[in-house]
Amino acid sequence: MSADLTPVSTLVEEIGRFYVTDRALLRAQQRITRVLAAAQPLPDAEIARYLAAVERYFAGFEREARAHLGDVDRRLARAAQLQFNLTAERSVTTKRVEITQRVLARARELSGG
């Protein structure tokens, strides 16, 4: 029998706030909630069964979230590189504008205009 059920109860409450449609996890959640509510000792096998259901359900979401995070990171890196390139291009173009303005100003001075 497990002595301290507080961590299990906390996990059960946390998972209870999710919108879960998976039948296996719903059954495991209901079963462990009933046992915890009855203030009965919870067998280690019951805890292990519940944790296995949690692992099965949330592992897929975690993989999906990590893949999405990787995709977002790659897109952010491309955006940062694009911003860097555009900033450099703007700097070069600004210098070209300054140079051409200087040349035009000198040419206008010499033409009397």
Image: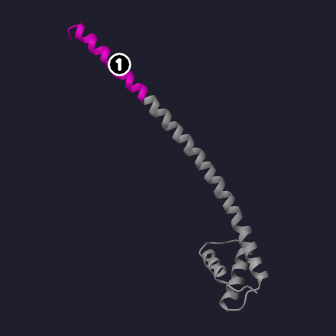
> Is 27 placed above or below 100 here?
below
Q: Is residue 81 left or right of residue 92?
A: right
Queried whether the magenta region covers residue 82, the answer comes back as no
Vertical placement of residue 60 versus 21, above or below = above
Q: How many marks?
A: 1
Residue that sits furthest to the right in the current view: 45
Q: Element under label 1?
A: helix
Instruction: Pick the quarter of the image with the C terminus.
Output: top left
Residue 64 placement (x, y as % from top left): 67, 57
The residue sitting at 73% across, 86% down in the picture is 42
What residue sits right under mark 1 in the picture? 99
Residue 110 covered by magenta stretch: yes
The image quarter in which residue 6 lies = bottom right
Task: Tell me which segment is drawn in magenta.
Answer: 91-113
Residue 5 falls left or right of residue 101 = right
User: Which residue is located at x 53 percent, y 37 percent?
Assistant: 81
Residue shown at 62%/48% (left/top)?
Answer: 71
Locate residue 9 relative to residue 97 in the image: left or right.
right
Tell me the kind of residue under disc 1: Ile
Residue at 70 percent across and 83 percent down: it is 32
Colour pattern of the rendering: one colour
Judged by its main secondary structure, the magenta piece is helix
* The residue positioned farthest toward the top in the image shown: 111
Residue 16 in the image, given as x and y percentages of width and height:
62, 77
* Position above or below: 74 against 56: above
Front residue of this view, candidates 86 and 45: 45
Check the image and report above or below for 51 versus 35: above
Q: Quadrant of the N terminus?
A: bottom right
- List x then y, in percent, for residue 39: 67, 92
The residue most toward the left is: 112
Check disc 1: other Cα within 10 Å, few if <14, some if 14-19, many if 20+: few
